[in-house]
Amino acid sequence: MEAATNRISKFGIQNLTIKTLAEDIGLSEPALYRHFKSKNEILLNLLEYFQTEMKSRIQSIPFEPSATEGDKLRKIFHSQLQTFSDKPAIVSVIFAESIFHYDDRLSKKVSEIINMMQEFVNANVDTGQKNGTYKKLIGASTITTIIVGAMRMAVLKWKLSGHKSNLVKDGKTVLNGILKMIENK
């Protein structure tokens, strides 16, 4: 998985093939075909690997007892954006959903990852609205869509810039702007 991630980071997702990956890890193509039947199977395994890592990482984020829902959301997104900055190939795979529309398994896996993030955010917003941290002018589902959509836009801009901007800083600015609109302060 690391070799596939490195290949995508260096050469793009279109350059990931069984042949190039076999060369990278010093295996023959037939040996690699025993583990993966196709490029899409490699991508599916990458997505599953990232999904498992993301869930574990987010669930293990330590929150101070006095942390507000906004503080928690900031830590979740900081962790996510830092991971993307550290491993930009993850973004290349997750944001390649347009090439996955021909493979239902890949589309479904990307959808699961997006839904998992939405669930974390929605639970945060719902709790924040119930405990008075967040305003109730807009429903939790709508606020979740705004937050996740804005963060996806920040990541996409970073990706299209060739990773030249500071994703963590830009994402923090976007999230803080949204929180300023929804927090009761």
Image (cartoon, rainbow, N blue to C red):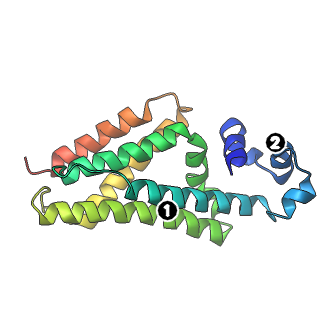
Q: Which residue lies furthest to the top in this view?
A: 164
Q: Which of 117 and 160 is in front in this view?
A: 117
Image coordinates for residue 10, horizontal then vertical, percent: 69, 36
Nearest the eye: 71 or 177: 71
Q: Which residue is drawn at 89% across and 58% down?
A: 31
- Which residue is under mark 1? 113
Residue 24's tag is: 2
The disc labelled 2 sits on which kind of residue? Asp
Q: 95 left or right of 138?
A: right
Q: What element carries label 1?
A: helix
Q: Can residue 138 be seen in this view?
A: no
The answer to whether any part of residue 128 appears in the image is yes
Left or right of 96, for residue 171 = left
The residue shown at (55%, 47%) is 91
Spot occupied by residue 168 in the image (x, y as percentages of width and height): 40, 36
Q: Nearer the viewer, residue 72 or 152?
A: 72
